[in-house]
Amino acid sequence: MIFLAISISCSSQASLTPTTVPPPTPREVLDQTSRTMEQIDSLHFKLLHETGFLELAPGLIINDVEGDLSKPDLLDISFNGSFGGITLNTQFITVGDSAFITNPLTGKWERGPTGVSSLGFFDPELGIGTIISQIYLAGFLVPKEQISEPEPIYVISGVLPTEALLPIVGQTLENLTVSTELTIDSDNFHLLEVKISGSVTPNDKDNVVRIITLSDFDKPVLIESPF
C-alpha cells in the first residue's frame, strides 16, 4: 500500500510538470510569418535607403517611399527623390481602377497611370509573404541595441534571390542574391522590418542598403479620390 501511494504521488507530480516546448527554428519562424503576412488586409510601410537610392528610370531617383496599402484596390504612397537634379515630392493614389498623381512641378492632382494596385503586395504568389518564403540559409541574430520594440522580437538573417523583390522595386537583376535581415514580432509573427544589403536593380551600386518597415496592420485605411 505504501508503494502504491508513492507511485500514485510520483505519477501525479509528473503529470503536473509542464512540458518544455522547443523553441522554433528560423525556418519555422519565417514560414509562420509568411502565412501571417498573407492574411493581412492593410498596413503602413516605409522604404528608406540607408545608402544608395532607387533609380526607376535614367535620371529618376527615388530616395524614400511611404504609404498605406489596403486590399484589394486602395493605395496611397508618397515618395521623394529627384529628376535631372530637380527635387521631387510626389503623391500617388489608386482607388479601384482609377489612379491619381500630383504633378511634381505644380503640386496639383492629375490622372495617373492605371494598372497599379496594392494587391500585388499581398499576392500569395508574388507578395510579401512569398518573398519571406524564398529566404534561405536563415539563422537567428542577437537583437541589436538600436532595436527597442516593446514586444519580444526575432531577428533573422538570410539570403534572398534578387528576383523575389520584383513586386517592390520593379526590374531586378537575375540569378543573384542579397543579404537580408528581418525583425519579426514573436507574439503575432508580424514582419516589422526588412533590411536588404546589396544590388537588386540593374542601376544599383554595390553598397546599396534598403530598409523596409511595416506597421499599423489591419487598421482601417481611408483613401479617397482627390477629385
Image: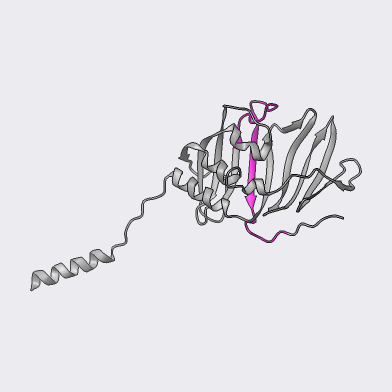
Could you tell whether 34 is left or right of 215 in the image? left
Residue 4 in picture, x, y percent from top left? 11, 70
Residue for point 60% across, 55% down:
40
Res 190 visible: no
Against 56, is 216 above or below? below
Label count reads: 0
x 55%, y 39%: residue? 181
Q: Residue at x 57, y 55 (%)?
A: 39
Q: Which residues are magenta?
A: 196-221
Q: Quadrant of the N terminus?
A: bottom left
Looking at the image, residue 218 sits to the left or right of residue 137; the answer is right
Q: Quadrant of residue 180?
A: top right
Quadrant in which the C terminus is drawn: bottom right
The location of residue 63, given as percent across then percent down, is 74, 37
Q: Position of residue 66 (x, y in %)?
A: 72, 47
Q: Is residue 201 magenta?
A: yes
By secondary structure, the bulk of the magenta-drawn segment is best described as loop
Q: Is residue 107 above or below residue 178?
A: below
Asked whether the viewer can see residue 150, the reply is: yes
Q: How is the image coloured?
A: one colour
Q: Residue at x 57, y 51 (%)?
A: 38
Q: Is residue 59 located in the magenta-colored stretch of the structure?
A: no
| Front residue of this view, candidates 97 and 179 | 97
| Location of residue 159 in the rendering, given as x and y in whole percent from the top left corner | 52, 34
Outermost residue to the right: 106
- Camera-side residue of 69 and 80: 69
